[in-house]
Amino acid sequence: MLARASRASTLITAAAALIIGIASIWLIPLFFGLEFSESVWVVAVLLAGAVLGNPGSVLAAGLSARGKPILRSLSILGGVIANLVGLLVLVPMFGAFGAAYASVISSFVTASLVLIFAKLHFGLKPSDFIVLKISDVKFVASSIIRRGK
């Protein structure tokens, strides 16, 4: 059940990220001026990081529910360290893009650690949480349709 929730949530997050990414093409210049048009790419990188980190976020809640909140905290700590190192290394070279890449690296590290801890402590397969299935698309679509009625 947790794996399905992770995949469904990731699918919804990806759809939302796509919509936000496309909207940002027009909204960023509209609200901040044409000189900020390049920041659309920074937004795209950040949105990719949100999608990439989503399975770990869902599974982290599962680790806490299974009585192992320390594993969630250790994963977050790993992500914070990765973010700090990424910021120190990448921002001087790439500015805002460097900060966005550091955020993506942080999300990836956090999610990876959560997946590793879930495998080591509970025998959960990481692929069950990240590999989308056709049934996930059907589940999300039917849930949206039911809510619309």
Image (cartoon, rainbow, N blue to C red):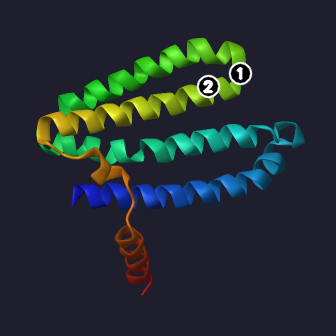
> Could you say where residue 13 lies in the image, as x and y percent from the top left?
48, 55
Query: As shown in the figure, which amino acid type bears the numbered disc 2?
Result: Ala
Comparing 127 with 145, the one in front is 127
**How many angstroms separate mark 2 from mark 1 (CA)?**
7 Å
* Residue at 79%, 55% in the rendered image: 26
* Residue at 43%, 82% in the rendered image: 145
Q: What residue does disc 1 label? A: 95
Instruction: Find residue 147 and report its image quarter.
Output: bottom left
Instruction: Find residue 110 and report its image quarter.
Output: top left
Instruction: Find residue 20 and report its image quarter.
Output: bottom right
Q: What residue does disc 2 label? A: 99
> Could you say where residue 15 lies in the image, as x and y percent from the top left?
54, 61
Q: Of helix, strand and loop, which one carries label 1?
A: loop
Comparing 77 with 114, the one in front is 114
Taking the view exactly as shown, the residue that stands out farthest to the right is 34
Comparing 3 with 22, the one in front is 3
* Residue at 82%, 42% in the rendered image: 37
Q: Is residue 34 above or below residue 72?
A: below
Q: Would residue 116 be found to the left or right of residue 149 on screen?
A: left
Q: Are marks 2 and 1 in contact (CB under 8 Å)?
A: yes
